[in-house]
Image: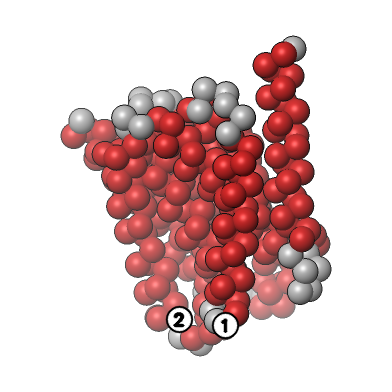
């Protein structure tokens, strides 16, 4: 048990440390600034979005469905995740606190760390893979979050301090998942599916700007619905095929 706890802390800390690492890379503004602001920034946004989609499609959703024993409950839970993240974003936007890159990073980092802890408690070999994916996605997300925060505070020291403070969220969430979800596989599945819906919404709303229309939020919610249609079809085929 002690080794499991240490492993969770190690994995989540390394994954969380990728947040300030991404910020540190973004702090080099004097090296090809025009290129940094355009090509590379768009590349890192796309990279983070691709990793998030991969984590959803190949880890979170399959593991979540398995935890629910193939129940169709997976569909409404995933939908509720997308709607909930939409509501959170709108509330923050109305209060002029909208920071999509930072919010997206935190809202997917925490539930994924919780899921990681729960998977460790269940002895799932997917836990280590999830930790790698979380760390990989945190680098480009940290890069973009730094640029976003720096634009608000214009202080590299304060910006990096905020990003370093987020590292501790990983071990806290991971240990919480280990102690509270290890014996509640169904709840763990709900969390993974709920966060998957939220991640899908954020990817198509904020990370994939090509799919976004200004002042319109239906397209990203439509992406969540579309994913659910494919998921429903696949589950029907597996059940009756």
Quadrant of the rendered image containing residue 77: top right
Please name the residue shown 72% across and 55% down the image.
221
Relative to 202, residue 111 above or below: above
Please name the residue shown 78% across and 58% down the image.
219
User: Percent from the top left, x then y, of residue 149?
Assistant: 52, 77
Residue contact at pointers 2 and 1, CB within 8 angstroms? no
Residue 156's label in the rendered image is 2
**Which quadrant of the rendered structure holds the C terminus?**
top right
- Left or right of 166, for residue 5: left
Residue sitting nearer the eye, 183 or 46: 183
SS for callout 1 = loop
Q: Looking at the image, is mark 2 or mark 1 nearer the viewer?
A: 1
Query: Mark 2 vs mark 1: which is more N-terminal?
Result: 1
Mark 2 Cα within 10 Å, few/some/many (few <14, many 20+)?
some
- Left or right of 104, for residue 222: right
User: Percent from the top left, x then y, of residue 144?
Assistant: 58, 67
Residue under label 1: 96
Relative to 152, residue 220 above or below: above
């Amino acid at each position: 048990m002690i080794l499991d706890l240490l492993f969770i802390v190690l994995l989540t800390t390394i994954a969380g440390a990728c947040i300030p690492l991404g910020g540190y890379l973004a702090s080099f503004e004097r090296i090809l600034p025009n290129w940094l602001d355009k090509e590379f920034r768009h590349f890192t946004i796309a990279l983070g979005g691709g990793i998030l989609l991969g984590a959803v499609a190949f880890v979170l959703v399959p593991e979540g469905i398995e935890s629910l024993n193939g129940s169709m409950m997976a569909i409404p839970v995933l939908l509720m995740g997308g709607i909930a993240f939409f509501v959170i974003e709108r509330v923050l936007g109305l209060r002029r606190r909208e920071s999509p890159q930072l919010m997206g990073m935190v809202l997917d980092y925490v539930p994924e760390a919780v899921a990681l802890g729960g998977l460790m408690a269940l002895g799932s070999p997917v836990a280590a893979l999830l930790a790698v994916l979380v760390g990989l996605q945190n680098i480009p997300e940290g890069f973009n979050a730094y640029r976003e925060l720096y634009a608000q505070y214009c202080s590299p020291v304060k910006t990096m301090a905020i990003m370093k403070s987020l590292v501790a969220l990983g071990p806290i969430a991971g240990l919480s998942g280990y102690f509270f979800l290890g014996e509640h596989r169904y709840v763990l599945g709900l969390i993974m599916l709920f966060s998957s819906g939220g991640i899908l919404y954020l990817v198509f709303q904020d990370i994939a700007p090509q799919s976004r229309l200004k002042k319109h939020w239906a397209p990203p919610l439509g992406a969540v619905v579309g994913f659910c249609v494919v998921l429903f079809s696949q589950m029907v085929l597996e059940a009756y095929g």
